[in-house]
Image: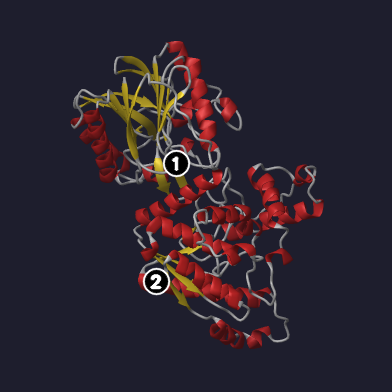
């Protein structure tokens, strides 16, 4: 049996573009000898469609394009993901479907059984679940057809959300092949968990498993691909590449299992950010970006990622020295620009800052300089970048990291200004790891940028650690508080200073208003600010 996997990059709502990719992959794989071809989840409409499914004509468009795909199929089945109307009298308006197309017709339809409503998912808002599992005759095999969450067993979830196992139901039906159409978002370390879970399922069923995962960035989510095929013993016989499209023909049974290289979290986060940025720009209609270069590690890593995503000719750097900027910071920014081969403008803000001080002199009379004057500088930089964005149609990529965003060490309408906050789910310690990875073949990010103490340079001799705990401590407390959702007492019991833990937690809680005004970011950890984390701004719960 030859399985054809179309690991494609879809765009939400681009029915014509998505179905063209599906059809080209189908024809290529059929020509190569596929006995069937499988796509990712909701490939026809793109994932996740969210409230677009409520829009007049969205589901009708999906139906039209599925019919057009069916008309182009021959004897080789195409199992394609799409959205369908719920034709029953009760329940949600739509169904998440996998449709089998063959010989010009729609042969059968399977619906998703388990609808996740945790973390980044909200499928219970849109879709009506299937009451029973679906089985079809595929390439001479009794095949169970499942969609993404249907295979996520309770031991790999935070808890047993469903009280139901489609895998167990299919096992009782005696299937000889298991197919899964998936849109499983990336997070560091997830690929290994998926392999372990899917391998266990294939072994338990005693049946080959073909898993087609989506690839590409859609808003804050990145889908990493890494589609998989397992034999009946649960061994991996094929893994498609990560972070790029690929149409693969896999023979089952294969000559033997493949060796999977250990996951590399830093490399995978780098690839996810590059792909997420590239697709965010392309799918939003932008080709070029502008980035404020401070001479610091965050802006340097952001610029390097942008060059990898869209090319040096499409990245513009701007260094904006203010009254407290060191010569070294400007020099480091210019050195970075030379190393990357990008154009860089120097736009001093000292004159603008003096003008603002003069403008506010009467209002501020008698008050000591403080954060108000510091933030004036950050906002002048934001104004500068947004002016360039407007003039030249370049998206501003903001450079704040997760550690800063967590505790509010950032300025609304200043360094937070932008169309995408690329590093907003990347802790500061991981930013340094990314810098070392970027420099793995030679110096791109200047050594001085990596070695010097980080500073916002908004007052004389300012250092981040004047205000914040050391980043290695801060990041671990944040991981435990935000991602693991432990209480301050539980975190303190792990050996952290109790006052420091309470300070961090209080800063996280009281700065929610800032994060809800921030540009969207790319999710790479298990719990990102924004999508998947819904916390009220006005609340007084402390734990």
Instruction: Determine if residue 356 is in view.
Output: yes
Q: Residue at x 36, y 68 (%)?
A: 393
Above/below status of 326 relative to 237: below
Q: Secondary structure at mark 2?
A: helix
Counting residues from the start of the chain, the first of labels 1 and 2 encountered is 1
How far is mark 1 from mark 2, CA to CA? 32 Å
Instruction: Determine if residue 467 is in view.
Output: no
Q: Quadrant of the N terminus?
A: top left
Q: Quadrant of residue 376?
A: bottom right
Q: Which mark is residue 390?
A: 2
The percent position of residue 68, horizontal first and vertical second, equals 21, 35
Above/below status of 534 relative to 367: above
Q: How is the image coloured?
A: secondary structure
The percent position of residue 226, horizontal first and vertical second, equals 43, 36
Q: Quadrant of residue 460?
A: bottom right
Q: Secondary structure at mark 1?
A: strand
Q: Quadrant of residue 9?
A: top left
């Amino acid at each position: 049996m030859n399985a054809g996997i179309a690991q494609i990059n879809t765009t939400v709502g681009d029915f014509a573009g998505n179905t063209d990719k599906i059809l080209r992959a189908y024809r290529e794989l059929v020509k190569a000898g596929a006995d069937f071809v499988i796509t990712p989840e909701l490939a026809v409409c793109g994932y996740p469609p969210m409230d677009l499914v409520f829009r007049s004509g969205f589901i009708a468009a999906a139906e039209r394009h599925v019919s057009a795909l069916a008309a182009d199929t021959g004897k080789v089945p195409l199992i394609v993901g799409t959205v369908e109307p719920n034709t029953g009298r009760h329940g949600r308006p739509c169904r998440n479907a996998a449709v089998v197309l063959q010989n010009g017709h729609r042969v059968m339809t399977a619906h998703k059984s388990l609808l996740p409503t945790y973390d980044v998912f909200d499928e219970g808002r849109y879709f009506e679940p299937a009451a029973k599992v679906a089985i079809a005759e595929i390439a001479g095999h009794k095949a169970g057809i499942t969609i993404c969450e249907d295979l996520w067993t309770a031991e790999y979830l935070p808890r047993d959300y469903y009280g139901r196992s489609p895998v167990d139901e299919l096992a009782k039906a005696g299937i000889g092949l298991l197919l899964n159409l998936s849109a499983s978002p990336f997070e560091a370390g997830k690929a290994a968990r998926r392999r372990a879970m899917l391998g266990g399922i294939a072994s338990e069923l005693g049946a080959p498993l073909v898993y087609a995962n989506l690839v590409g960035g859609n808003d804050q989510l990145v889908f990493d691909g890494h589609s998989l095929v397992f034999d009946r013993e649960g061994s991996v016989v094929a893994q498609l590449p990560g972070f790029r499209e690929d149409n693969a023909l896999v023979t089952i049974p294969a000559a033997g299992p493949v060796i999977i290289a250990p996951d590399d979290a830093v490399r995978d986060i780098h690839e996810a950010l590059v792909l997420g940025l590239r697709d965010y720009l392309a799918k939003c209609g932008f080709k070029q970006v502008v980035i404020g270069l401070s001479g610091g590690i965050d802006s340097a890593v952001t610029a390097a990622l942008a060059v990898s995503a869209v090319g040096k000719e499409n990245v513009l750097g701007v260094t904006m020295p203010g009254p407290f900027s060191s010569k070294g910071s400007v020099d480091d920014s210019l050195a970075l620009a030379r190393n990357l081969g990008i154009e860089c403008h120097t736009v001093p803000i000292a004159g603008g800052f003096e003008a603002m001080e003069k403008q506010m002199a009467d209002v501020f009379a008698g008050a000591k300089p403080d954060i108000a004057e510091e933030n004036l500088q950050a906002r002048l930089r934001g104004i500068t970048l947004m002016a360039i964005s407007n003039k030249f149609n370049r998206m501003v990529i903001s450079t704040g990291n997760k550690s800063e965003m967590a505790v509010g060490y950032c300025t609304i309408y200043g360094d937070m200004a932008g169309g995408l906050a690329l590093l907003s789910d990347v802790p500061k310690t991981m930013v340094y790891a990314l810098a070392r990875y970027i420099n793995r073949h030679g110096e791109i990010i200047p050594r001085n940028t990596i070695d010097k103490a980080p500073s916002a340079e908004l007052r004389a001799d300012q250092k981040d650690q004047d205000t914040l705990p050391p980043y290695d401590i801060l990041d671990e407390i944040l991981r435990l508080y935000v991602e693991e959702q432990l209480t301050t007492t539980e975190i303190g019991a792990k050996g952290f200073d109790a006052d420091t833990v309470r300070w961090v937690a209080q800063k996280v809680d009281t700065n929610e208003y800032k994060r809800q005004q921030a540009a969207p970011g790319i999710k790479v950890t298990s719990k990102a600010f924004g999508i998947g984390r819904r916390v009220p701004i006005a609340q007084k719960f402390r734990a």
